[in-house]
Image (spheres, coloured by chain):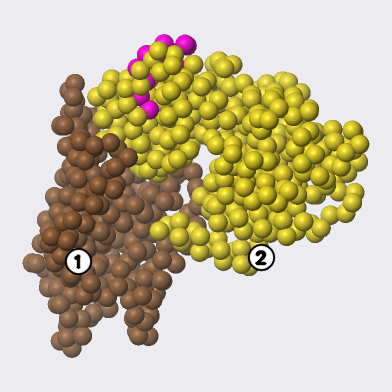
Chain colours: A yellow, B brown
Amino acid sequence: MRKVFSAIVASTVLAAGLTACGSDSGSSDEVEIGILIPQSGDAAVTGRFMTDGAMAAVEEINAAGGINGKKIDAKIYDTVGDPQNGINAYKKFTSDGGKFAIVGFSAVVTAIGPLASREDVLLVNSGAPPFDAEAMGSHTIHTLNGQDHEMQCAADYAYDTMGTRKLGAIFADIAANRAGVESLSKDFEEKGGEVVGAESAPQGSSDFRSVLTRLKRTNPDTVYVYTYGSDPGNILKQMKELDFDAKTLMYSGAAVPQTIEVGGAAAEKSLYTAGLFDPSNTDPQTAAFLEAYKKVDPDSDPSSLGFYNATLYDGVKMLAKAMEYVDDHGGDMNDPRTVEKAFYEVKTFEAATGTATYEEGDPIARKPFQVLEVQGGKFLPIDTVEC
Amino acid sequence: MGQILVNGVSQGALYALLALSFWVIFAVTRTFHLAHVAVLNVAAYTLYWVFVEVGAGLVPAIVAALVMAVLLGVLIETLVYQPIRRSGGDGMLLFVAASALLTMSQASLALIFQENARGLEDEVPAPLFRNAHLTVTRYDGAIVVLVVVLGAAVWWLMTRSRWGRSMRAVQGNPELAGYFGIPVGRVYQLSFAIGSALLVPAVVVMAMRSGVNPDMGFNPVLIAIIAVIAGGTERQSGAMLAGLFLGMLENLILYWISSEWQTIVTFAVLAVALIARPSGLRSAVQTRVG
């Protein structure tokens, strides 16, 4: 019911014509890119991080002269993070003549991906780890690791490095997370491990004790946690309450400050697979991102920036590089299908979140993962995983 | 099984306390006060703000949350519901107003504190009891004691005090009660004050255990409302027992079947119980949906 209220409020805002902001239609000296990311609703905080990252890349590229002299005209469309508002935002974007969009949030990408693929629009998904690339649109390019790849890395790390032989899992009761845990279980069992229990709970539950009690009875060495929001922190805290002392390995979306804020001391020593981003790195991509982000959000603390601050920055820069490649080779950088092909031809993209590579016909980037551990109330990288 | 039982009693006691807080308002005023969720959320954030941001200690934080809850509950009744009733607005209009207040409060809290959940306690407190198979936490103990003490206090208030007799008179027939000189508006305000105050002990346990977030009150209060309707809206004990039953059921189901069926089976059992004994629902239908 709460979502119905949110939808009513969001629809009112949309009806008032506040879905898009930015300058009016661009000229031939400009390339238009839509940023279809939540600006309101439950997903607004993450959405604003992502938008700042995307705008940081736009400003950096424009300050350097644009894409072969063409400036990027970026417009922001509020998808609220849900399918219906996502479709409304997409329709506004296409009625404005948009052909290239940076997107995130799996519910939105799944809703608009098939439309974009039919309508000759290129979506660049830089915010939703893809779990079913076909469902997200046959012409959508993903600049993040796929869910299956993360699950494979998690299974490898749990078995090979953590020494786990009996694995338990707890996940948010939604399709993507269920599919992820099934994929993880398959990978882990292929290595010779045993999955002793997999329990689900509605995302946003505050009480996980009974689910954890069930899992505790199976005596796992490690519990894999695949949920987000306040859930991971509450799960860690309630495991401590129940004296359930299995190790924990969590999905990348849980590696956010909220987990430590809610979990408190119980979050110490918890482990996370995460996209490769470390603000203390000194490589040129990370340095460029930090400098560009500071211009968009001067109050930001560079040491607190995380993967989801950087991933849309990378998405815009990868799209710009593909467009530049097309232009350099005499093609039309305003043609979505030509730019889509260029991702496979460029093949390797250096990015702040790790080097991304594309294999012909696979629209999902492959990037390395890192493993983070909470130490002293902070996420610290302790390992990298190539799988 | 022992741990599942402890979890069920603890969860059921929380629902029973929330059901009691909603019942005090609904039984007297017949107002479907969905904005009760908003009062819970605002009280929780007041507790968080005074305890964590101001650092004033738990007792001042609880007092501040209590004041804020009572003030907000009474203001909603006085400034929103009473004018609608005076102008002849029906129950549906009151429900729409309550829904608007709820949406506004959630959006405001998200704007002020952002959507992220905030924790109140860094350390997990030592348990009351622990052995190899069973842990009883301080939160479990606190919520059970609170529900017994506050349930008894409300029973005494409603059956033994002068104000309680006025509330029961208004509950039976507000027009007739007014005719005999009972200040119906004041009695409504009093029931909102008591119902809102009763939220605070539940808020303290919820916030200390799981932190605060702008959505924290919706699901528990929704289950508490279901408990009030299912338990029979005329009886305090019915509402509280239904809350306890739902909490126990949610947890006991896990002993036999997979967690993914928990919500479906809980509400299927509830539906079957209501079909078998529909008096709870019947009394709800006879009331104003407002």
- The local crowd at label 2, few if under 14, some if 14 to 19, many if 20 or more residues have their Cα within 10 Å, is few
Badge nearest the viewer, 2 or 1: 1
- Which amino acid type is marked by label 2? Gly
Where are the magenta residues, as a range?
Answer: A158-169
A211 is within the stretch colored magenta: no
Which residue in the protein does label 1 denote?
B281
Residue A17 is marked as 2
Answer with left or right where residue B281 lies relative to residue A335.
left
At 75% from the left edge and 53% from the top edge, which residue is drawn?
A: A98
Answer with left or right where residue B286 lies relative to residue A248.
left
**Pick the front one: A81 or B81:** A81
Reply above or below: B232 against A199.
below
- The local crowd at label 1, few if under 14, some if 14 to 19, many if 20 or more residues have their Cα within 10 Å, is some
Answer with left or right where residue A22 lies relative to residue B53.
right
Q: Quadrant of residue A45?
A: top right
Answer with left or right where residue A130 lies relative to residue B121.
right
State the separation of the CA atoms marked 2 and 1: 43 Å
Pointer 1 chain: B
Pointer 2 chain: A
Question: Can you see residue A45?
Answer: no
Q: Position of residue A336 (x, y in %)?
A: 77, 44
Q: Position of residue B164 (x, y in %)?
A: 14, 70
At 26% from the left edge and 30% from the top edge, which residue is drawn?
A: A214
**Pick the front one: B145 or A272:** A272
Task: Say which quadrant the C terminus of chain B sits in.
Answer: bottom left
At 18% from the left edge and 49% from the top edge, which residue is drawn?
A: B244
A168 is within the stretch colored magenta: yes
Q: Are marks 2 and 1 on the same chain?
A: no
